[in-house]
Amino acid sequence: MTDKVEKYREMMDLFRTYFTFSKRFYSEEVKSTKLTPQQGRTLMYIQENPGTIQRQLADSFHLRNASVTNMLKNLERGGYIERKQDEKSARIKRIYITDLGKEQVDEMRKSFDSILEKLSKRVDESLLDQLIPLLKELNQEIQK
């Protein structure tokens, strides 16, 4: 194995540790809601983009279409979203948030804000100023 591969492995392990730790914060904070963090982010996206379509969700969250299909079915079953036929194309279903969904978005935003507040108290801002540009650059390189 090359040094570069080993560095990449170490980076991935560090990311995994960070996300595992962050997930604990999310799990504790969102207990009061009935949704997973991904469902909450999806509802937020739908609220900000009323009439979005499934493909846009999949692209925005970098998810497989099948994963989005299952999540939308669960959100619809729970009464958080509704799908309506597009006026111009019978094949397209537009997705809208319901009043119940809006209530959950408010709860999730409070939870996410609380989580970010807790995390920001543990990390020095200068570290974030260094890390954010590096992660942006890394993401651009990976997407090439």
Image (spheres, grey):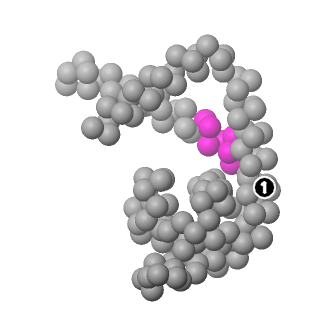
Residue 32, x across and y down, in percent: 80, 56
Quadrant the C terminus occupies? top left
The front one of 27 and 140 is: 140
**Identity of the amino acid at label 1?**
Asp
From which residue to which does the magenta span run? 21-29
Image position, residue 100 (x, y; %): 77, 70
Instruction: Let me know if residue 41 appears in the view.
Output: yes
The relative height of residue 139 versus residue 90 in the rendered view (above or below) is above
Residue 44's image quarter?
Answer: bottom right
Above or below — where is 2 with respect to 95?
above
| Image point (55%, 32%), residue name | 18
Would residue 138 appear left or right of 26 to someone viewing this image?
A: left
Residue at the spot x=52%, y=82% of the render? Answer: 87
**Percent of width and height locating residue 81:** 65, 72
The residue most toward the front is 88
Where, quadrant-wise, is the N terminus in this rendering? top left
Residue 5 is one of the magenta-drawn residues: no
